[in-house]
Every structure is written in C-alpha cells, then in structure tokens.
Image (cartoon, grey):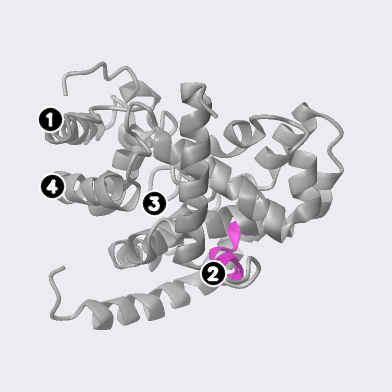
Amino acid sequence: MEKEIKGNASQLFSSNNANERTDPYGFERPRDFESYKDMMNEYVAVLNRRSMKWSKLLQGKSHVEKNMTDMHRTFPDNVLFQSKAENCLQSTLYNVLLAYGHHNKTVGYCQGMNFIAGYLIIITKDEEKSFWLMDALLGRILPDYYSPAMLGLKTDQEVLGELVKAKAPAVGQLMAQYPGIWTLVVSRWFICLYIDILPIETVLRVWDCLFYEGSKVLFRVALTLVLHHQSEILRARSLSDVCECFKQITHGAFTMDCHTFMQKIFTEPGSLSKATIEKLRDKCTKKIQEEESGQP
C-alpha cells in the first residue's frame, strides 16, 4: 500500500501549496493544514525508507444484483468521485462492487463496502487489483463482517469491550453502564476499517498492517485510542457525552502524526496475541448467538 503512494508522497508539497483545497488523493485538506504539512515534510523520508523495506521483503514473491444507492454517498467531497470530474471513478467503483457481488453471492453488497472499494481504487488505480484486494479483505481477513447477519462485526465489537475491561478497567466500568454502547461508538470504525475516521495517511498505514498481520490490528488501533484518551472518556456523564468523546478522540495531532501513532499502537496496548483474540471471539460469538436465539 505504501509503495503505491510513494510517488504521490514525494510530491505532496512540490506541486501543491497550502492555499489549494484538495490533497493528492482528492480529499479536502484539513483546516490545520500547516501542522499537517510540517509533519508530512518529515514523513516523506519515512515513506521512502519503508517503501524500500517493503520492496526488499516482497522481492521475488508473488504473493450483484442489489441497490447501489450508496454510489453518490461515496466520498462526496472527493473530486475524483464527483460526476463532473474528467475521469470520474464512480463507474470504476460500480464495476468493482458489482463484480464482488457476483463473486460472493452470500454477501452481495453491504453498506461500508463502497468506502473500502473506493479507497482501494484511489490507491491502486486499477479495477482488477482493487477487486482482488477487496476479496482478500472481506473473504479471508475479515470473515463475516459483511455477511447478512454481520456476526463477525458484532463479535469483534464485544471483543473490544472485553479487551477494554482488561486493559482500561475504569473505562470498561463506565461503558458497562450503557448496554450496546460498543455498537454505537465503534461499529463504523470496524466496518469502514477507519476510513473517514482517521486521517488518510494513518488509514493507509493501518491497512498495511491489516493486510500483513490480519484483523487484530483493528483492536490495537481502537485500544490505543481508548488508552490514550482515558481521562477524556472518564469525564463523560451521559450516553451522549460518551458518543461525542469517541468522535473527538479520532481527530487531532495524535492521529495525524501517522508514524508516531503506528508506533504507539504496538506499544500502548501491550501484549495482544492471536490466541487471546480467538478465545475472546469464541466466547463472544457464543454469547451473541445465545442472545439472538433466546436460549441460555
């Protein structure tokens, strides 16, 4: 993923200035663009180093007939997806989603998939590559996130709740006062894989780890956000306060400095083994199934 953006990253500011409205990916620049610009001036060198590492690692290895009403809701502020754009990506997005719907008839189309396909298209600029990357994500890395019952998504929301209880007990106790709270505050984090939640450079780094290490990185990101902002979360005095706080903690300098943020997600949550995740998934899946069936 990083290798794909290296060319754009090296020109982030050589061909653009702070007065221009959109970044190289077509998204509107943040209001605090000057601080972002300062960070990116240093981050370009990091990207170049990491691109060389990825190239060395990968050298010699090869490794729907449903409503598409979400088409116009996909990145409406991104110039690349606007119908008036010279090379509008909406038709490419439609083709990828339609192809995946025919490929995986059990899943078909589910809200959230449009953002994932859209991001892949922005980076790869290729329909076929985007399709196969999407198939890897939805079919192998995130099973049951987008199935009709969304059991995988529901399970992982509950798993996050269990992890927070263990790693941030005070926050876990606060959240326990509001049944179903994790669905309210993090379902969009998981189903959109942090798209439109975190800054684009940060999302791309998270996705690198997602493809390489699997879905547990989604928990590392969520736990880091919670752990880093415990004091703010614990000041919440109502359900609306909690929801607003979880919106705010994804913004600001902490998430914008993607290199530092990625270092934090592998240190702040501490140990998080695959075995631990799978054990919690089994526990939470069983609980959800019992609740939905009405059987103890």
Closest to the camera, between mark 1 and mark 3, is 1
Mark 4 or mark 3: name the one nearer the start of the chain: 3
Can residue 120 be seen from the camera position used here? yes
Amino acid of disc 1: His
Amino acid of disc 4: Glu
* Quadrant of the frame with the N terminus: bottom left
Whether residues under marks 2 and 1 lie with C-beta atoms below 8 angstroms apart, the answer is no
Q: Nearer the viewer, residue 14 or 116?
A: 116
Q: CA distance from mark 2 to mark 4?
A: 30 Å
* Quadrant of the frame with the C terminus: top right
**In-image side of 161 versus 239 (left or right):** left
From the image, tell me which residue sits under label 4. Answer: 128
Tell me where the magenta segment starts and ends, as one range: 255-265
Looking at the rendered structure, the secondary structure element under dot 4 is: helix
Q: CA distance from mark 4 to mark 3?
A: 22 Å
Q: CA distance from mark 1 to mark 3?
A: 32 Å
Relative to 119, residue 208 above or below: below
Can residue 11 be seen from the camera position used here? no
From the image, tell me which residue sits under label 2. Answer: 259
From the image, tell me which residue sits under label 3. Answer: 24
Q: How many marks?
A: 4
Q: CA distance from mark 1 to mark 4?
A: 14 Å
Does 184 lie within the magenta span?
no
Closest to the camera, between mark 4 and mark 3, is 4
